């Protein structure tokens, strides 16, 4: 059985916490797209852990963790992340694997993105690495690992030729032999973890193991389905989960959307319900809305139903996890965007970026609960207006809200 966690907004919805919660009930946790632009924050025993590449399931002893073929990997960053976790007592031997098909981020990919400002990326070379992949000139971890283990002059010429082609693509000068030597030194340090993870995951499924698939970012940063061009470079939706691991869809797959009780966005691009006022500042402060990877303040706004409904349509959510409900505790009333107005007409989520930029929110305002919900674990304990808020969102989306997160701690969650 597979459980797939999908961000229902623009990322930063709390997928890291939900992955940590659900990892307890799964044997395997696999990451299927993105690079070190992810910033999954998990609190365990009073300690904070921030994951950029490694699935947060690694904190659970005995769980197998996989970085899938749909990811791009900065080996230097990955080794640093592994070392930091090892210092805190986390072990990797025999339960951590990186796909030999995953694309390698090389230093010139970071150089190619150094001056990017239009979209507002993390500038970690992720976009250029995916560009190399689409251009068929990227190196994979398997390419370099094969070079190390089964050296031949012919294979060396092949790999150097790939690097030459990739440098031309990005308009960057470099010395391919030196780049290869540097990449080989880096990959050598994680060579024991590089594996055919497609075969591994299929074998685990055949053995009856349960698998949790987690991605980075959210639905509306998807390269195909997001608010283009202000998107990431990979598939953040359910299709990316399958293609990014090599696992096929199956009857019984559980697809869970993760959404905040409000909405945030990092970088550029339209955010219809954005609050550039004291409400937005209160949400930012109360939710600690600063990027785990970049530290940038997130833009904050009211919950957007048309956007969430579209995310469910694209991904086929069976249920939704609603996070950070407690951030809204102090508000006397809570507006919810239930539709858009575009060119003077009421509209659902539009299909083009230009029309999305023209979307103005139409609100329904609900009464606040002005009572602390932080740390609550039982639905019956929530204030009545908090319950009505959750039920209103559920009814408007047409999807059951099965989990309500009431704080950052691993146990601060209500199972409905």
Image: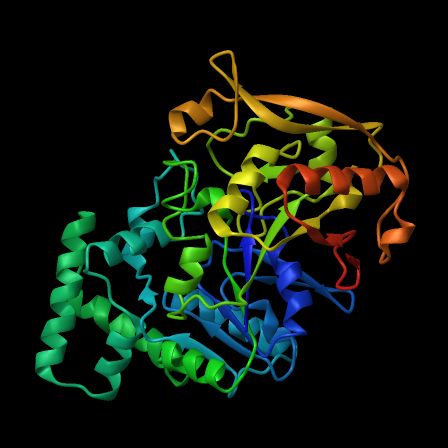
Q: Is residue 17 left or right of residue 67?
A: right
Q: Quadrant of the C terminus?
A: bottom right
Q: Is residue 371 left or right of residue 287?
A: right
Q: Is residue 403 left or right of residue 143?
A: right
Q: Position of residue 274 (x, y in %)?
A: 60, 28
Residue 297 makes an appearance in the image: no
In the rendered image, the vertical position of residue 347 relative to residue 251, given as above or below: above
Residue 304 makes an appearance in the image: yes
Q: Is residue 107 left or right of residue 16?
A: left
Give whichever of 130, 23 is nearer the camera.
23
Residue at screen point 84% across, 55% down: 375
Give whichever of 390, 409 is nearer the camera.
390
Give whichever of 3, 52 is nearer the camera.
3
Q: Position of residue 303 (x, y in %)?
A: 65, 35
Which quadrant of the view contains residue 262? top right
In the rendered image, the vertical position of residue 261 relative to residue 44, given as above or below: above
């Amino acid at each position: 059985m597979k459980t797939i966690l999908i961000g229902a907004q623009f990322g930063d919805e709390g997928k890291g916490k939900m992955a940590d919660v659900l990892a307890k009930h799964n044997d395997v946790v696999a990451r299927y797209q993105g690079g070190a632009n992810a910033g999954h924050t998990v609190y365990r025993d009073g300690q904070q852990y921030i994951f950029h590449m490694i699935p947060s399931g690694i904190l659970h002893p005995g769980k197998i963790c996989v970085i899938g073929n749909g990811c791009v990997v900065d080996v230097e960053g990955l080794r640093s992340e592994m070392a930091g976790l090892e210092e805190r007592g986390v072990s990797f031997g025999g339960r951590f694997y990186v796909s030999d098909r995953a694309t390698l981020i090389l230093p010139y990919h970071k150089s190619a993105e150094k001056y990017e400002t239009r979209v507002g990326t993390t500038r970690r070379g992720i976009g250029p690495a995916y560009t190399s992949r689409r251009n068929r000139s990227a190196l994979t971890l398997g390419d370099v690992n094969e070079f190390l283990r089964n050296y031949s002059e012919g294979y060396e010429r092949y790999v150097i030729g790939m690097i030459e082609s990739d440098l031309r693509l990005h308009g960057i000068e470099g010395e391919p032999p030196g780049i290869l030597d540097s990449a080989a030194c880096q990959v050598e340090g994680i060579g024991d973890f590089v594996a055919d993870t497609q075969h591994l995951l299929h074998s685990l499924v055949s053995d009856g193991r349960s698998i949790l698939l987690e991605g980075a970012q959210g639905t509306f940063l998807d390269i195909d389905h997001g608010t283009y061009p202000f998107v990431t470079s990979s598939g953040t939706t359910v299709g990316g989960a399958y293609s990014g691991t090599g696992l096929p869809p199956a009857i019984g797959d559980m697809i869970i959307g993760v959404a905040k009780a409000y909405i945030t966005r990092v970088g550029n691009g339209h955010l219809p319900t954005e609050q550039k006022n004291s409400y937005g500042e209160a949400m930012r402060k109360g939710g600690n809305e600063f990027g785990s990877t970049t530290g940038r303040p997130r833009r904050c706004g009211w919950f957007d139903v048309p956007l969430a409904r579209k995310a469910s349509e694209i991904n086929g959510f069976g249920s939704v996890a609603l996070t950070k409900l407690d951030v809204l505790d102090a508000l006397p009333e809570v507006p919810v965007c239930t539709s858009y107005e575009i060119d003077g007409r009421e509209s659902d989520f539009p299909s083009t970026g230009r029309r999305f930029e023209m979307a103005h929110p139409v609100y329904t305002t609900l009464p606040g609960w002005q009572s602390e919900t932080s740390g609550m674990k039982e639905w019956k304990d929530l204030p009545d207006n908090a319950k009505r808020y959750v039920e209103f969102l559920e009814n408007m989306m047409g999807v059951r809200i099965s989990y309500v997160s009431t704080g950052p701690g691993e146990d601060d969650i209500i199972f409905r």
